[in-house]
Amino acid sequence: MGRIKTKITILLVLLLLLAGGYMYINDIELKDVPTAIGQTLSSEEEEYTIQEYKVTKIDGSEYHGVAENGTKIIFNGKKLNQDLSDIKEGDKIKAYFSKSKRIDGLIKVAKVND
């Protein structure tokens, strides 16, 4: 049983060395390896212009916010067709604007968890 474990360990070490050598020869870094979450984030960034705001006032279904650079936003939660009940005054949000259809304006809002 001990010989089998030793052989498996040697094979795994050789496999890691081969993979490392391949990555070194082809100049591949781990950050270049695509992942499911990386692809999702990059495609999301391509579809939207994303701005971060702090909610300063909630008046019924109307939300007011301000960005760090002073840019203000006012949006109506009912028009977005999403549940914004978890967003409170003082929360940070990400506002997603369509890049291709600028007339449509705000597409969705997501609460930022600090």
Image (cartoon, rainbow, N blue to C red):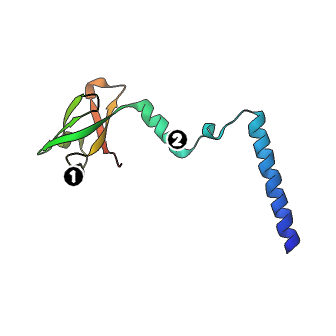
How far from the left and from the top, in percent, is residue 106? 27, 33
The reply to whether discs 1 and 2 touch (Cβ–Cβ < 8 Å) is no
The CA span between labels 1 and 2 is 29 Å
At 22% across and 41% down in the image, what residue appears?
Answer: 55
Name the secondary structure under disc 1: loop
- On screen, residue 47 versus residue 13, left or right, reads left
Question: Would you identify the image quadrant in which residue 48 lies?
Answer: top left
Image quarter in which the N terminus is found: bottom right
Question: Would you identify the image quadrant in which residue 35 lies?
Answer: top right
Viewer-proximal residue among 112 and 107: 112
Q: Amino acid at mark 1?
A: Ser
Q: Residues within 10 Å of mark 2 (few under 14, many from 20)?
A: few
**Is residue 61 depicted above or below 25 in this figure?**
below
Q: Which residue is mark 2?
A: 38
At 34% across and 30% down in the image, what residue appears?
Answer: 98
Count of residue discs: 2
Question: Would you identify the image quadrant in which residue 29 lies?
Answer: top right
**Is residue 73 depicted above or below 83 in this figure?**
above
Q: Of callouts 1 and 2, which one flags the residue occurring earlier in the amino acid sequence?
A: 2
Q: Residue furthest right?
A: 3
Viewer-proximal residue among 102 and 15: 15
Q: Residues within 10 Å of mark 1 (few under 14, many from 20)?
A: few
How far from the left and from the top, in percent, is residue 59? 11, 43
Q: Which residue is mark 1?
A: 85
How far from the left and from the top, in percent, is residue 96? 33, 35
How far from the left and from the top, in percent, is residue 97? 32, 31
Name the secondary structure under disc 2: helix
Q: Amino acid at mark 2?
A: Gly
